[in-house]
Amino acid sequence: MALLNIVSQTGESKSVEAKEGLTVMEIIRDNGFDELLALCGGCCSCATCHVYIDEGYADKLNPVSEDENDLLDTSDNRKANSRLSCQVPVTAALDGATITIAPED
Ligand code: FES
């Protein structure tokens, strides 16, 4: 279990409990953030689950795959800490991380 601080596109934040075994996308979606469209359902083919993950947690994340990297490159809003949330599994190491939903492209 990890406690994540989710920040919406309008800056509202909410602390949510995240169960290991789910992805960050599933946690955000299941906690009522409708702005995270996640249109492909987690198949790494839409980039509508784009988030920014707390830079202090960069070394605790799984690496970005080539497919994820290519999709992130299609976003005008890509930053150094961008991830597709469907590609990031929840782990206890993420406890306390702030995750901000990226603006829509
Ligand atoms: S939900 Fe489509 S790439 Fe993440």
Image (cartoon, rainbow, N blue to C red):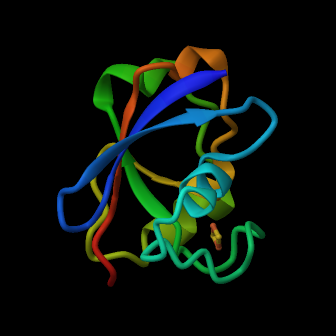
Q: Judge whether 78 appears above or below 23 on screen.
A: below
Residue under the image location 46 percent in, 66 percent down: 33
Left or right: where 47 falls relative to 42: left
Location of residue 101 in the rendering, given as x and y in whole percent from the top left corner: 36, 60
Q: Quick check: which quadrant has ligand 1?
A: bottom right
Q: x, y percentage for residue 14?
A: 35, 44
Q: Position of residue 36 (x, y in %)?
A: 48, 71
Q: Dividing the image into 4 quarters, which one contains the C terminus?
A: bottom left
Q: Nearer the viewer, residue 97 or 76?
A: 97
**Quadrant of the image occupied by residue 73:** bottom left
Residue 8 is drawn in which quadrant? Answer: bottom left
Q: Position of residue 37 (x, y in %)?
A: 54, 79
* Residue drawn at x 54%, y 71% as measured from the top left: 71
Residue found farthest to the right:
21
Q: Quadrant of the N terminus?
A: top right
Above or below: residue 67 compared with residue 105: above
Residue located 54% across and 55% down the image? 28
Which of the 4 quarters of the picture holds residue 56?
top left
Q: In the image, is residue 24 above or below residue 55?
A: below
